């Protein structure tokens, strides 16, 4: 979650210093991934059970991203 929160600031989805709520920032980042027209790649390394990460698995409604 912390990496997603940091990424939200990096892509400009939240202010550079973050909103103060890392969970909300992480959710904002997953929303950004879903809707952006920019190309993206998220690497989730060493995940033994993909079901365990649930909603943190990003999707791309625009077809510009990959996991």
Image (cartoon, rainbow, N blue to C red):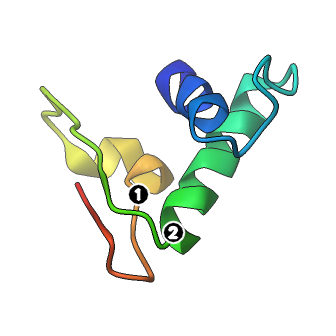
Farthest residue to the bottom: give it: 62
Q: What separation in Å lies between label 2 and label 1 (alpha carbons)?
A: 7 Å
What residue is rendered at 66% in x and 47% in y? 27
Image marks 2 and 1: residues in contact by CB distance under 8 Å: yes
Residue farthest to the right?
20
What secondary structure is found at the residue carrying circle 1? loop
For label 2, the SS is helix
Rendering coords of residue 61 (x, y %): 45, 82
Q: Which mark is residue 8?
A: none
From the viewer's perspective, tell me whether residue 20 is left or right of residue 52.
Answer: right
Q: Is residue 64 above or below residue 18?
A: below
**Is 45 above or below relative to 34?**
above
Q: Position of residue 64 (x, y in %)?
A: 33, 72
Q: Residues within 10 Å of mark 1 (few under 14, many from 20)?
A: some
- 26 or 52, nearer to the observer: 26
| Residue closest to the eye, 51 or 27 | 27
Upstream in the sequence, badge 2 or badge 1?
A: 2
Which labelled disc corresponds to residue 34?
2
> Number of marks in the image?
2
Residue, disc 1: 58
């Amino acid at each position: 979650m912390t990496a997603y929160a940091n990424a939200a600031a990096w892509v400009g989805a939240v202010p550079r210093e973050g909103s103060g709520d890392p969970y909300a920032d992480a959710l904002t980042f997953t929303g950004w991934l879903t809707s952006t027209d920019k190309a993206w790649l998220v690497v989730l390394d060493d995940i033994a059970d993909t079901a365990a990460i649930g909603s943190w698995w990003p999707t791309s409604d625009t077809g510009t991203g990959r996991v």
